[in-house]
């Protein structure tokens, strides 16, 4: 998948300026397909040149015109075509995993501290996802297709974060024999 496809999905849900799109990436799509604001702006420019998106200048008082992007005909066709193509299996590139594997070659206590830091971050992200779930999807059984698809992706994110918290607990327990949040101590 290219960033173009993530942008087409976001703009299919709601047209917006580059700034609005970048903020939506920060709050939702970016959790599972990250892109910097610069990457989004560069890609939007390229997509506009290829007619995948349209761009309408909206006058603003005391500021430059705002460019509002929407999916164009060729972009909608590309999105439909892309949905039919097989996706590559996700490949994990995780620096923490490499550090854990290398812990016996250096400061294992520093690696343990890093595992615990990651756990704290994953736990915070998990709680943020759960708040989003409660706020945005109070009745999952009454969702329209667009909201159902958003709900399913959020549920996937929750399950991934739950798994990562549990894994960090397992690694911590194995490295120092302690138990975090009721995780069982694992010995290799």
Image (cartoon, rainbow, N blue to C red):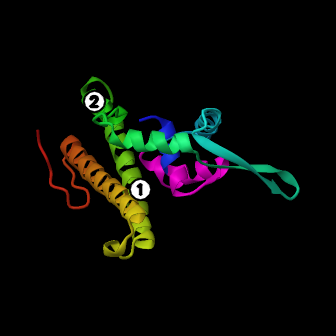
Q: Work out whether residue 33 can be spotted.
A: no
Q: Position of residue 65 (x, y in %)?
A: 80, 50
Element carrying mark 1: helix
Q: Where is residue 143 in the image (x, y as percent from the top left)?
A: 37, 71
Q: Which label was assigned to residue 125?
A: 1
Residue at x 24% of width, y 52% of height? 166
Quarter of the image containing the N terminus?
A: top left
Q: In which quarter of the image is residue 158?
A: bottom left
Of the pair 61 and 103, the residue shown nearer to us: 61
The alpha-carbon separation of the residues under discs 2 and 1 comes to 26 Å
Residue at x 38% of width, y 64% of height? 145
Residue with the most extreme left position = 188
Residue with the most extreme right position = 62
| Magenta residues, start to end | 10-33
Q: Does the magenta stretch include residue 144?
A: no
Q: Work out whether residue 50 can be spotted.
A: yes
Residue at x 46% of width, y 39% of height? 78
* Residue at mark 2: 103
Of the pair 101 and 58, the residue shown nearer to us: 58
Local crowd at mark 1 within 10 Å, few (<14), some, or many (≥20)? some
Local crowd at mark 2 within 10 Å, few (<14), some, or many (≥20)? some
Q: In this view, does 6 lie above or below 146?
A: above
């Amino acid at each position: 998948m290219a960033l173009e496809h993530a942008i087409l999905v976001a703009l299919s849900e709601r047209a917006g300026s580059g700034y609005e799109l970048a903020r939506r990436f920060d709050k939702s799509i970016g959790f599972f397909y990250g892109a910097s604001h610069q990457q989004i702006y560069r890609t939007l420019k390229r997509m506009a040149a290829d007619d995948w998106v349209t761009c309408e200048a909206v006058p603003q008082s005391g500021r430059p015109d705002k460019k509002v992007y929407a999916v164009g005909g060729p972009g909608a066709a590309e999105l439909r075509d892309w949905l039919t193509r097989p996706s590559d299996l996700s490949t994990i590139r995780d620096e923490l995993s490499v550090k854990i594997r290398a812990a016996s070659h250096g400061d294992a206590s520093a690696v343990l501290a890093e595992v615990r830091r990651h756990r704290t971050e994953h736990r915070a992200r998990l709680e943020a996802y759960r708040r989003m779930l409660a706020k945005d999807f109070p009745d999952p059984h009454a969702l329209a297709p667009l909201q159902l698809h958003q709900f399913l992706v959020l549920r996937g994110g929750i399950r991934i974060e739950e798994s990562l918290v549990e894994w960090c607990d397992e690694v911590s327990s194995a490295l120092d024999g302690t138990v975090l949040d009721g995780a069982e101590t694992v010995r290799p």
